Amino acid sequence: MRIRPTFFTFVLLLGIMTIPSMGCLEIAPEYIKPYQPELGITFHGINNDYEYAEKYINNASLGTIRYDIEWKRTFPEKDTPDNEYINQMINITRFYGLRGYRQVIVLWHPPDWVEDYSPSKFTEEYLKFVEVYITNPLFMADIIQIGNEPNNPLHSKVFNIWSNSDIHDFIEEASLYVKSERPEVMTAINFQVIVNWQYRMHNIVVSNGDMLDIDILAIDYYPGTWNVGSYRWPAMRIYMDYLDQYERYKGAVFETGYSTPTTEIDSEYHQHIFYTKDIPYLIDMITQYNYQLTSATTIDYLLFYSLENLDTNLINPEANFGLIVFNRSAYPVKYKQAYFDVQKLDGYVAKAIGAGVRLPLYGFSVSLTLGLVYFGIIFLTSFIIGYALYVTIISNSEFDIDIDRQTRIQRAIFAMKYATIITSSIFILAVIPLTFIYGILIIPLLYYITTKNPGYLFASTASITIVYILYIVMLQIGIFVV
């Protein structure tokens, strides 16, 4: 049995090019880190002990803080503002703002006296509430959230009875007012992931063909506590698809966490698992989405709920999302293990494999597979054409009764060589220009643009080079057989 040198060349080049290229598939930390979501904390009751709480936020390396300013405490009665509360909240915004925190401020919690108003009258009064803060030059905010979870029936009576169009108009009018007074401030709305959440969200965001004029479309997502389902975050895929469909909103997860009532099922150990396994998985998902060339936007924030347990009720899930147990009458606080887990997330580098594009072109193996499929289709097509020519020539010889056996053999050999030449010609004419464009120009440039990693130039070029080598081997085999 004869083995041509081409075989050894193929094996050698395959080994040389495959091994180093595999190391290029994971994106380097310096390239992927900027695409990770900014981590932060959401909690209520910030007006109490906010200076003391800041120490724990800072030690956990959380750069974004989200909290409420309450309408019902700003205007406990119609047209009667509580100036003490207003000044306190403005001072809190300055306390955090001057220390470099990004602030997401939820302007909500309507008073009882406004609940029965019509949508237009309600909106008019709400804008008076917003005006108190947004027009004050001392007030500091980066993002204003208008309302809270309009699809959650527990949060507001008005959203339960209003139409989707009414809610849309309310949010948009408030958003436009905020941006007219503070163009640098972004506006946001959030939806809780509950049953059919995506349909209610879509019907509010797109009302009568009019896209909602806001900057951030966020979700609140609690797998394992408020949401039935896997910790693999299935709703995130739905959410990402809607962001791509809308092509105009920034994304954010404004609330997620794990509650720890003292039960065997929901314990601090399970909260620890949530923050060490499931949150890193979510960060990977978001980072990969942000890194994709085809993503229409980015998901910029991931905020945990909550900094502290709300009270000492050990049964109520809502009261036990905290990373710490904050006893206001007896310092110091009790740390949960999850607090230290969140501290470590500051140094976490997302695992982003491949070029980060949704097109099926990321990674060495996928590129090589596509190349082999492409190679196989062209080779099979050209082989069929060549074989058809061979059969045609042989068939014509069979009907010629005036030629001897030796001549028939010579014609058969000629037919085989002729068919091989035609097959090779078709293959070369089809492969060379298209493969050059695919392998040498498009794929390496796509990899480099999406990863900023020069290693991908080598990885992608190596994969298409192997396809070329396979072509040479097959051509040599054909010539050898002839």
Image (cartoon, helix red, strand yellow):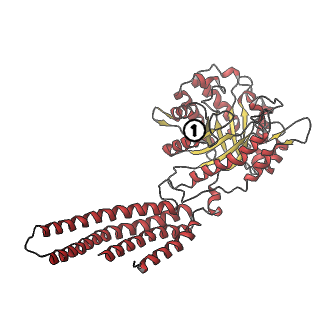
Q: Residues within 10 Å of mark 1 (few under 14, many from 20)?
A: some
- Foreground pick, 196 / 328: 196
**411 and 244: which one is in front?**
411
Q: Please give left or right for residue 354 compared with residue 326 in the image.
A: left
Q: Is residue 322 above or below residue 122?
A: below
- Residue sitting at the far right: 330
Where the N terminus falls, by quadrant?
bottom left
On screen, residue 112 versus residue 446, left or right, reads right
The image quarter containing residue 402 is: bottom left
Q: Is residue 376 above or below residue 112?
A: below
Q: Position of residue 213 (x, y in %)?
A: 54, 39
Looking at the rendered image, the quarter that the C terminus falls into is bottom left
In this rendering, position of residue 115 left or right of residue 389: right
Does any portion of residue 121 appear in the rendered image? no
Question: What residue would you read off at disc 1?
Answer: 176
Check the image and name the residue furthest to the front. 405
Q: Indicate whether 111 appears above or below 353.
A: above
Q: Is residue 331 visible?
A: yes
Q: As drawn, which residue projects farthest toward the bottom?
A: 5
* Count of labels in the image: 1
Q: Position of residue 95 (x, y in %)?
A: 79, 45
Q: Residue at x 71, y 30 (%)?
A: 71
Could you say where residue 191 lies in the image, as x and y percent from the top left?
61, 35
User: Looking at this rendering, what residue extends furthest in the left direction?
Assistant: 402
Q: Give the image quarter of residue 387.
A: bottom left
Q: Secondary structure at mark 1?
A: helix
**Residue type (three-letter) at the residue carrying disc 1:** Leu
